[in-house]
Image (cartoon, coloured by chain):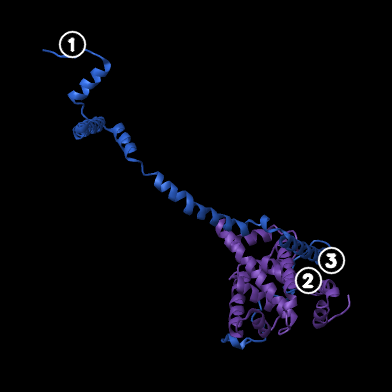
Chain colours: A blue, B purple
Amino acid sequence: MKPKNNISEQTSENDFLSPLPESAKTEANGYKVPDGYFDSLGSRITDRIILEENKAFKKSQIPVFRKPALWAPLLATSIVAVLLVFVIPAKKTATIPATDEWNEINMAYDASYAQEVLFTESNSMDFELENAVISLSESNTSKGINEITDDEITDYLKDQELDLDMLTYK
Amino acid sequence: MPDYTDSELLELFRTAENKHYAFNLLVRKYREKIYYFVRRMVVSHDDADDVVQNIFIKVWNNLDSFREDSRFFTWLYRIAVNESLSFLKNRQLRSWLSLSSPEASMVRAMQDDNYFDGTEIQKRLREAIIRLPRKQKAVFNMRYYDELSYDRMSEILGTSVGALKASYHFAVKKIEQSVTGI
């Protein structure tokens, strides 16, 4: 037989398959199946179809709250929203300590600074006390019209029937 | 079993009360042809059984949308080829993870196969087919065992006739070398 050089010429052939005997070419090709396999195949396929359809039906019957895929993202979004709106801003303000707290913190780390702070505080207290005294004396001088005169003392003693001479130092 | 044509079975399938009956008839009509095609592709009986069941479940799920633009057998065969090829592809992926070649695991499965009583030449032929690439294996089985025409194969696989001829030619060359030990 003349060999064909062009593959497209080999259209009707198994003729170039000469080393393979026709006896090897059966449908089963030596393969066996368990007894009764083909007889039961149809019913096993039908069983699987029914099983899968029941599964699909049950899935469609599951209420929404049993499907985390539906409500879980919603819940997560709500939690994040609450954190953003309420918790995180509140925490931000709380993290900045008041001045006194800063002083306490610094005092805890630096004793000399603590002394300095105490000194400043005592100075400021002295200054406040001094201011208070000054303002009191100023208020007294401004109230000169309220000072007691000698005549008023004399009148008072007269009322009390005391001897003026006894009181007069000569 | 009544001798229905494919068109009659499809018509029967479309009536709700006869759906299961028609489907069972379709399974009975094609089960052996499909099984042996799949078995030649995947070798082991258990794997073939899984794949065949999947094929007919796909047929059940999609038969309503089958519009008879092609013949039913062509459509069924296409599903069978695709399922077999994707099974082999998955097995290849698994074998990469297990660090053994898919051909080696198929040869092992073949040697352990209790459901094989072929002749010596059939054994050698089967081992040679196992070593073919997936698509070439499908082309060889369709052409050599099922004796499908290239036109029909082209319709099933969506590949040009020329490419199929080339693929078959190379498959035969490899098998010749393997069987004759050249």
The crowding category of the residue bearing disc 1, from other C-alpha atoms within 10 Å (few below 14, some 14 to 19, many at least 20), is few
Q: Is residue B76 above or below residue B89?
A: below
Q: Position of residue A86 (x, y in %)?
A: 48, 51
User: Which is more N-terminal, label 3 or label 1?
Assistant: 3
The amino acid on which the numbered mark 2 sits, given as a three-letter code, is: Arg
* Residue that carries the numbered disc 3 in the rendered image: A39
Q: Are marks 1 and 3 in contact (CB under 8 Å)?
A: no
CA separation, marks 1 and 3?
Answer: 149 Å
Quadrant occupied by the C terminus of chain A: top left
Quadrant occupied by the N terminus of chain A: bottom right
Q: Label 3 marks which chain's residue?
A: A
| Picture disc at residue B31 | 2
Q: Position of residue A26 (x, y in %)?
A: 75, 73
Give the label, 1 or 3, closer to the camera: 1
CA separation, marks 2 and 3?
Answer: 10 Å
Q: How many marks?
A: 3
Q: Label 1 marks which chain's residue?
A: A
* Residue that carries the numbered disc 1 in the rendered image: A166
Q: Label 2 marks which chain's residue?
A: B
The amino acid on which the numbered mark 3 sits, given as a three-letter code, is: Asp
Residue situated in front as seen by the camera: B140 or B34: B34
Q: Tag 1, which secondary structure?
A: helix
Q: Tag 3, which secondary structure?
A: helix
Q: Tag 2, which secondary structure?
A: helix
Is residue A100 left or right of B49 when viewed as pictured? left
Q: Position of residue B89 (x, y in %)?
A: 60, 66
Residue A14 visible in this rendered orientation of the protein: no
